[in-house]
Amino acid sequence: MLVILELRDCRNSVELPAVGCLSSLKHLLSGLKKISCIGASFYGIDDITGGSARWLSGTKLFPALQNLELVEMQKLSDWEEVGDDEGVVFPVLEYLRIEKCPQLITTPTHFPGLQNFDYPWQ
């Protein structure tokens, strides 16, 4: 059972692995400098239409994730939101840290359990 996943210094990675369906994952940390978008492949889905994946009804992505840190992702500019009224993404996320992601323009807006958002001055 995978609980912690740490992706660091993967200098040549241009795409994130599909980890959205890892049901026991509680902590995810990353430092992937060449990633420009967090999208469908990260969530483990193939297509995003109009900002939401229509087939997600009743699906939970990252059902146990409590801690997410996006650090030193200098090229990251877009973090796509997925889900619909019934599909749930990050249902128990409590801590989100975004640091050294100077290009980041868009992020998801719905984190139902978020208690702590850490965004140190870039």
Image (tube, grey):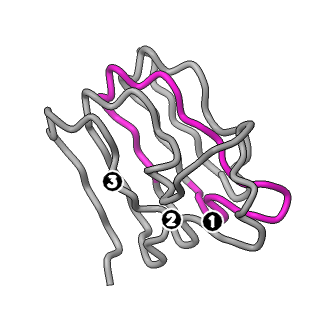
**Tag of residue 58:** none
Residue 50: x %, y % from top left: 74, 37
- Disc 2 residue type? Leu
Spatial CA span between label 1 and label 3: 21 Å
Q: Which residue is mark 2?
A: 65
Q: CA distance from mark 2 to mark 3?
A: 16 Å
Give the farthest residue toward the right: 85
Q: Which residue is mark 3?
A: 17
Q: Is residue 17 left or right of residue 82?
A: left
Residue 77 falls left or right of residue 109: left
Q: Is residue 67 above or below residue 65?
A: above
Query: Which residue position is annotated with label 1?
Result: 92
Q: Amino acid at mark 1?
A: Val
Q: Which residues are magenta?
A: 68-94
Q: Earlier in the sequence, mark 1 or mark 3?
A: 3
Q: Identify the residue shown where x is 53% and y is 65%.
A: 62
Residue in front for this viewpoint, 26 or 121? 26
- Residue pictured at 50% horizontal, 65% vertical: 65
In depth, the one of 68 and 40 nearer the eye is: 40
